[in-house]
Image (tube, rainbow, N blue to C red):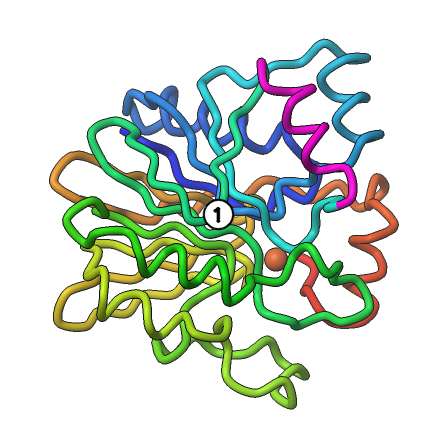
Amino acid sequence: MILITCDTHCYYENINKQIRHAEDDLGVTVDCVIHLGDFGIYRTHLSHYFKRKGRRFSRPVYFIEGNHEDFDELPWLIKKYSDYFTHLPRASVNEIEGYRFLALGGSGYMDSMVTQKGAIITDHQINACLKVPPKDVDIIITHDCPIGIGMPNTKGMEHYGETGFPRSDELAPKLQPKLWLFGHHHKWHEYEDDHTRYFGLASSWKGFGLLDKNYEFRFVKYTIPYPQEKQSLIMKLLTRLKIIQPN
Ligand SMILES: [Fe+2]
């Protein structure tokens, strides 16, 4: 069973809490975790959790990047912490637990005050995805959602227009994945078309997904109390700007 999570925003321990809930309370075996971005790749947070506190994840963790990572330092931080988690590069196909996942981290241009250039998905990366033979892709994993699946905008952000990153609507018709999993919007969302079932996950404080054999996927709603007193500056800013909603 693969546990699917996203949007930990530096609260890495949420992942271990989700694994414990899945195994101890739900009785499932978690083979590994795939994180759909906004992991929180920031030097000081990683150092504090993994080096100073000596913590590790209890299962192998793979991740794609979101828009809230330090893109200037991402390449060397991925290498430095490669014993703790594994990065799935954009436009790469990765076989995990028998599924072939096409990874495409990043997002569309959205919250301009805190979005770095490195977060934006480029034409080159979309083209690289479109060159992958459809027979090689089972599941697409992205941070942002695709266009055209009815994903509602965050309240107050409607002026940004339709949700989804540019040219994302070219990928499913060409690659025809069975599943497309994404995070970023901090909302549960489901949609289905002729070939693909789409699942958007809420943040790691609200739950996770479980992916079993035969493309069986389900949401698990599980609340982790949000540590208000330890809110990072970026989370306080995002909450104040109404980019995210407090739990
Ligand atoms: Fe995000």
- The image quadrant where one finds ligand 1 is bottom right
Q: Nearer the viewer, residue 106 or 145?
A: 106
Q: Nearer the viewer, residue 108 or 210?
A: 108
Residue 196 lies in the magenta stretch: no
Question: Does the beta carbon of the residue at mark 1 sit less than 8 Å from ligand 1?
Answer: no
205 horizontally vs 246: left or right: left
Estimate the x, y position of residue 41 in percent, counting from the top left: 70, 37
* Quadrant assignment for the C terminus: bottom right
Q: Measuring 69% from the left and 19% from the top, which residue is drawn there?
A: 80
Q: Which residue is mark 1?
A: 90
Q: Nearer the viewer, residue 37 or 90?
A: 90
63 horizontally vs 75: left or right: left
Q: Nearer the viewer, residue 151 or 65?
A: 65
130 horizontally vs 43: left or right: left
Estimate the x, y position of residue 155 in percent, counting from the top left: 62, 80
Give the amino acid at mark 1.
Answer: Arg
Q: Measuring 85% from the left and 42% from the top, which residue is drawn there?
A: 229
Q: Residue 215 is drawn in which quadrant?
A: top left
Please state the extent of the stretch shown in magenta in the rendering.
Answer: 72-83
**For mark 1, does the 10 Å Cα neighbourhood hold few (<14), some (14 to 19), or many (20 or more) residues?**
many
Residue 74 lies in the magenta stretch: yes
- Looking at the rendered structure, the number of numbered marks drawn on it comes to 1
Estimate the x, y position of residue 172 in percent, counting from the top left: 27, 66
Estimate the x, y position of residue 89 in percent, counting from the top left: 50, 40
65 horizontally vs 130: left or right: right
Q: Is residue 54 above or below residue 178?
A: above
